[in-house]
Amino acid sequence: MAKPKKRYVCQACGSVSSQWAGQCADCGDWNTLIEDGGGVVTPFQAKHNLQSGGRAIQLVGLDTDIALPERMETGIAELDRALGGGFVHASATLIGGDPGIGKSTLLLQAAAKIALRGLSVAYVSGEEAADQVRLRARRLGLGNAPVQLAAATSVRDILTTLGEGPAPALLVIDSIQTMHSDLIEGAPGTVSQVRASSQELIRFAKERGTALVLVGHVTKDGSIAGPRVLEHMVDTVLAFEGERSHQYRILRAVKNRFGGTDEIGVFAMQTEGLSEVGNPSSLFLTQRDESVTGTIVFPALEGTRPVLVEVQALTVRLASGATPRRAVVGWDSGRLAMVLAVLEARCGLSFSSCEVYLNVSGGYRVQDPAADLAVAAALVSALAERPLAADAVAFGEIALSGEVRPVAHGALRCREAAKLGFGRALAPAAQADTGGLQLAGFKNLAAFVDHLLGR
């Protein structure tokens, strides 16, 4: 039961005492201690008051001159691009992706390149034996790299081993779901085990200045398995995307405390491992010898890198009374429904009796809102069976009012298209710099449809 807390305050000097006395111990005056009624204190508050007994911390201003964190380049330009310039010392990076996507291969290549530059690298695998990792390194042509390998799952054993000598510059844990801490009950992979193991490894990295990389499993919906707090604990979260049936892989920064989250790295899976792709547009553009209806090229933007992808649409007329289907691959289905609604309401086109199929070639996933105009162009071309110009690109955002709005970095998109041989751009009318392309500008979607249909 809560009880009031008594205190006695000196009326002369203001000192506080827990019990009454005739003379104040601080100023020496007599009969100046008066009882002051304090707040109600519960037994829990009495035992867990954190306002005293701690260690004073140092507060610094924003204008304090400090050295910026050093970066450790991996030697793989696409990985460094996604990281913002390389691994940062005393940082924690989490990389997730589907099984077999190439996470371990990429990290082994990065670890080997860093070790060949003379830095100490430790690679701890909880899923494979050390001989298996060594065989993969030989297949990748990295068998002579001085990477220290170990197969272990006990966090205590790992930290005890690494604490005996100088800390490594890079520590790779593959994977965090296989690690086990004996301070927590439960099997490896449980929420408590993943949280406790990650906390101990991250604490070691922060104290010893090691760049820590954790490999994480993903669930069936593509999110990283384990507690969501794991993504808050680390400094950088990388998502390795792609289909195992396709050659390319995309490394996307989901969170980065030391750089931007809009950069991507593009790789191609080959026999000798993951190779960098300097021109990602070549992966997503098909060679068309003749004009095909329902296809248009869209200059997507990932960070500072434009990537040209092909948007494909197909419409199929149905008999009366049948329910039309809407299928989307590589784009947001909700945004497709919005574009279809604007085309019907503002342009007089009818898709209600058609099945609509939309695809982004190469398995690429488009998240750029500037793809609205390209999707609309592909849909109109498929519905009217009128092929679009093979040397044209389209980009622009569509409002519900039918307005075609300008998008960011339009000049950069146009310059990349011109570099790859395209000659014209279907874009918002407000687009000023066309990068050498012939511009066909539109203020609203109705004028854009009229242009495509030759009205």
Image (cartoon, rainbow, N blue to C red):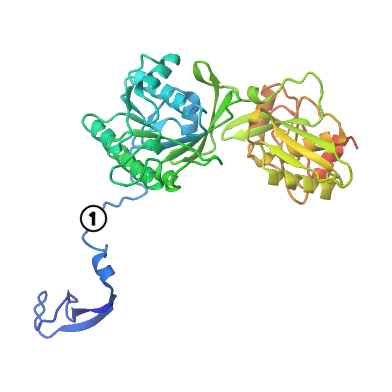
Residue 441 showing in the rendered view: no
- Is 209 left or right of 21, judged from the image as shown? right
* Kind of residue indicated by mark 1: Ala
Q: Residues within 10 Å of mark 1 (few under 14, many from 20)?
A: few
- Is 188 left or right of 218, judged from the image as shown? left
Residue 239 pos. (x, y %): 51, 36
Q: Quadrant of residue 188?
A: top left
Which residue is more in the foreground, 192 or 224? 192
Above or below 75: residue 339: below
Residue 269 pos. (x, y %): 54, 21
Q: Residue furthest bottom?
A: 31
- Is 128 left or right of 57, judged from the image as shown? right
Seen at 63% across and 23% down, the residue is 283
Question: For mark 1, what is the residue?
Answer: 56
- The quadrant in which the C terminus is found is top right
Above or below 429: residue 293: above
Tag 1 secondary structure: loop
Residue 262 showing in the rendered view: yes
Above or below 346: residue 126: above
Residue 437 pos. (x, y %): 73, 28
Q: Quadrant of residue 181?
A: top left
Seen at 32% across and 18% down, the residue is 146
Which residue is more in the foreground, 185 or 389? 185
Which residue is more in the foreground, 301 or 114? 114
Residue 200 pos. (x, y %): 31, 42
Q: How many marks?
A: 1
Seen at 37% across and 22% down, the residue is 114
- The quadrant in which the N terminus is found is bottom left
Above or below 49: residue 155: above
